[in-house]
């Protein structure tokens, strides 16, 4: 159990209360918890997973392997038929889950873990032709939310893939705004969302593209509503 706060006396009272009702041991200042190494300084708290990473490499049996850069090679295409199946499927699932957990302190490896692209590709999976999307949110210089996933439907165009990604990003944005408001952080100004697809931006600002957007009508109305409400702003950037 981790107990934290700025009320030192309150923390002491809580520990005393718990000690009277449960068998427990005070381990002192937090230094390690569930694979996370914690260190504190006057600048704040720092999280690392050095030991967790070392144990993961040993469990995978690649301690002597050559070090390579991440993310993985640009335009590298992987599919379910590449390579030979691993002899231990359970170990493979454990390693993948451990890599996902490692992204807590190393969000930069999310690309390699999920095999994804930053915004949205189109029909990138050669097996089922579904597109992969990804988003990230910055609060100041800090990355606070990120995700990459494969879309649940097959997009008929790159614009559709991008717009569905925009709808997912908008949904995450709303949740983050509510969370930050609960934490007392002002979120009254519109959040800037950068997009590299001009057609997706035009659809969001124009409600007359019925023939092109009728099959993604719900996403169109959802994004457009919050755009008009001033929740977000769309800004075009180069790919």
Image (cartoon, helix red, strand yellow):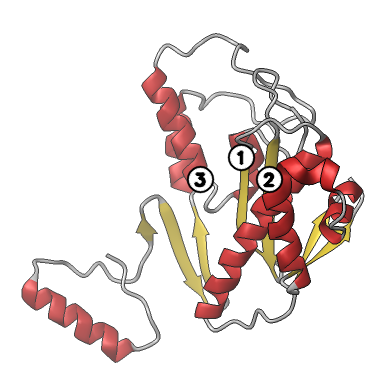
Q: Quadrant of the N terminus?
A: bottom left
Left/right placement of residue 236 relative to residue 48 reads right
Label 2, secondary structure: give it.
strand
Instruction: Give residue 61's position: percent from left, percent from top.
Output: 46, 23
Front residue (pair 181, 109): 181
Q: Mark 2 = which residue?
A: 134
* Mark number, residue 102: 3
Can you say whether 122 is above or below 143 in the image? above
- Give the image quarter of residue 24: bottom left
Q: How many marks?
A: 3
Q: Which residue is mark 1?
A: 149
Q: Is residue 158 visible?
A: yes
Residues under numbered marks 2 and 1 in contact, where contact means CB atoms less than 8 Å apart: yes
Q: Image quadrant of residue 222?
A: bottom right
In depth, the one of 193 and 85 nearer the eye is 193
Closer to the observer: label 2 or label 3?
2
Residue 147 at x, y percent in the picture: 61, 48
Q: Does residue 118 show up? A: no
Residue farthest to the top?
84
Q: Provide residue 21's location: percent of width, then percent of height.
A: 7, 74
- Mark 1: which secondary structure? strand
Side of 1 where 121 appears, left or right: right
């Amino acid at each position: 159990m981790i107990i934290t706060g700025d009320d030192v006396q309150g923390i002491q009272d809580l520990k005393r209360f718990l000690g009277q009702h449960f068998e427990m041991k005070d381990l002192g200042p937090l230094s390690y918890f569930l694979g996370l190494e914690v260190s504190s300084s006057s600048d704040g708290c720092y999280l690392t997973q050095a030991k967790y990473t070392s144990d993961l490499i040993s469990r995978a049996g690649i301690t002597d392997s050559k070090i390579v850069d991440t993310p993985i090679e640009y335009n590298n295409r992987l599919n379910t038929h590449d390579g030979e199946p691993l002899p231990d499927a359970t170990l493979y699932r454990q390693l993948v889950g451990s890599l996902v957990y490692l992204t807590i302190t190393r969000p930069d490896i999310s690309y390699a873990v999920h095999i994804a692209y930053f915004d949205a590709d189109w029909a990138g999976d050669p097996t089922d032709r579904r597109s992969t999307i990804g988003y990230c949110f910055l609060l100041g210089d800090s990355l606070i939310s990120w995700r990459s996933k494969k879309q649940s439907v097959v997009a008929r165009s790159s614009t559709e893939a991008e717009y569905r990604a925009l709808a997912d990003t908008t949904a995450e944005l709303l949740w983050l705004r509510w969370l930050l408001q609960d934490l007392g952080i002002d979120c009254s100004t519109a959040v800037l969302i950068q997009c590299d697809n001009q057609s997706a931006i035009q659809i969001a600002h124009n409600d007359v593209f019925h023939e092109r957007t009728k099959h993604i009508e719900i996403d169109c109305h959802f994004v457009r509503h919050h755009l008009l409400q001033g929740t977000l702003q769309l800004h075009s950037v180069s790919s």
